[in-house]
Amino acid sequence: MQEKGIISTNQFIWMLFIIITSVPNFLAPEFLIMIAGRDAWLSVIGGWFLDVLLALIYAYMGIRFFGQNFVQYSITILGKYMGRIVGMLFPLFFLLVCTLLMSGLCQLIKAMFLPKTPYEIILISGFILIGYAARNGIEVNGRVAEIIGPVYLLSLVVLSLLLMPNVEISRLKPQFDHGVYPFLIGSPFILTFFGICIMMAMFIPLCNRPENGFLAKFTAVSMGAYMIGSIVVLSVAAFGFEQVQNMLNPGLMLSRLVNIGHFWERVEIIWMVIAVGSGILASAVMIWAFSLGLSQIVGLSDYKPLVYPAVLISVVNSLTSFDNNIELANFIHYTFPVIAVFVEAGLEIFLFVMALVLNKHSGHS
Amino acid sequence: MLTFLILAVIFIFLTDGAALVKKKQWRELSTLGLLIGIAIFLVIANRFEIPTPVDGLQTLFRPVGEVIFEPHDYRYN
């Protein structure tokens, strides 16, 4: 049995929102500010715009190949062999993102909250939850996203309000102080993190209203960009961009600043609980997508037996690939964006062009 | 790491592998075996310092990333 779950448009939006927000929140803001400086928030807007353009292609392909995700329509467009090779790159990309997200998340937890706990224990604990969640299928994750998503969004709104006394907007000025180059490079950089919501191509065939694919993506990416943009603006306005680029996680540092009358303080653990929940859900969806994609490529009757081995690969990859935080940071800063642009934009545009040239479609009206 | 890997493989075989053998779903079983094999390879590669796929990605894509996403120098001249 392949995935038989059906998700509503609402669940589609919240799952995408959690993916769009969790991955950049844990991995990207400090690097974005390093690249774009004070103009980082403008880069977030630029990244949002580019991502919406990309969403048009994904939504169009979802309708053209009705009932198929990108792994399946790769095979429809390019044939049995080439299609499988190209289609396999999407699930592999999701596995890589899951590895990076969990490595970043667990290194943050170790550095900030559990310095004496071995990294392996934190990582494996997280992955046990991920395996359990991914095995329960997309419907269960969709329902969880409907609960966690609004809480995550609301937590940022509350955080923004509580941080108002610490914020100095003059730190965001002047804009384009070093020309437009930092902004122009920052936009595609953050796009590569927003672009992980190419996951929409896995959701569209399972959505009860596939024609809402673009609307769902637009809503999710707009909320996600608002959230990441807010974190960038608040952290630059609170700390100054020179300091933020050396921080481990600006969102967490912002929550540490909250102090209302020496009574309401140390709220970072609340923020972290919500953010970790979202991170685990996002990783679970990645593992689900990898298992489902691989099972479709190999032609299996069920994807669930692949979930635990996928989790095992991701754990081992996290433990063996990055010996320390610096190696992970360098990979996220320099290597990941290039891979992401290649997969998120390059491959999908290639499939889009090939579908037009070869006049391929799923045959459904 | 090795202990964890052995425990994980036993767990996976007990939860999924045995059921697949019983149902004679050989293709599913071989895919599962392949994924476990990849995990074992990664552990061995780490032990003997053989380059892993992530190292390959770094070698291939990092030079490009370093050119494009180099942090801007914000110091004033």
Image: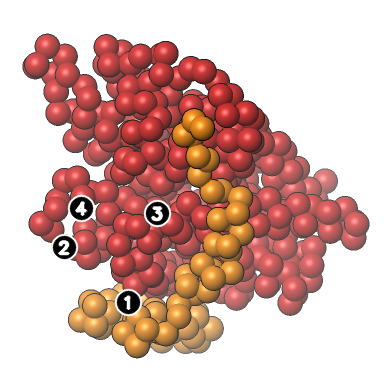
- Amino acid of disc 3: Ala
Say left or right for A334 vs A136. Answer: right
Q: Relative to A308, is A226 above or below?
A: above
Q: Are marks 4 and 1 in contact (CB under 8 Å)?
A: no
According to the picture, the residue beneath numbered tag 3 turns out to be: A329
Tag 3 secondary structure: helix
Residue linked to disc 1: B12
Q: Residue at x 55, y 20 (%)?
A: A175
User: What subunit carries mark 2?
Assistant: A
Q: Label 4 lies in what chain? A: A
Report the side of A125 relative to A201 (left or right).
left
Q: CA distance from mark 4 to mark 3?
A: 15 Å
User: What secondary structure is marked by label 4?
Assistant: helix
* Camera-nearest residue between A281 and B27: A281
**Disc 1 from disc 2: Cα separation:** 24 Å
The label on residue A118 is: 2
Q: Which mark is residue A110?
A: 4
Q: Which residue is drawn at the image coordinates 50% and 80% (left, top)?
A: B31
Q: Are marks 4 and 2 on the same chain?
A: yes
Do tags 3 and 2 sit on the same chain? yes
Query: Which is in the foreground here, disc 4 or disc 3?
Result: 3
Q: Is residue A146 above or below residue A77?
A: above
Q: Look at label 4 and name its amino acid.
A: Lys
A305 sits to left or right of A325: right
* Foreground of the two, A304 or A128: A128
| Closer to viewer: mark 1 or mark 2 | 2
Tally of marks: 4
Q: Which chain is red?
A: A
Residue A83's spot in the image, x, y percent? 73, 69
Give the color of chain B as drawn. orange
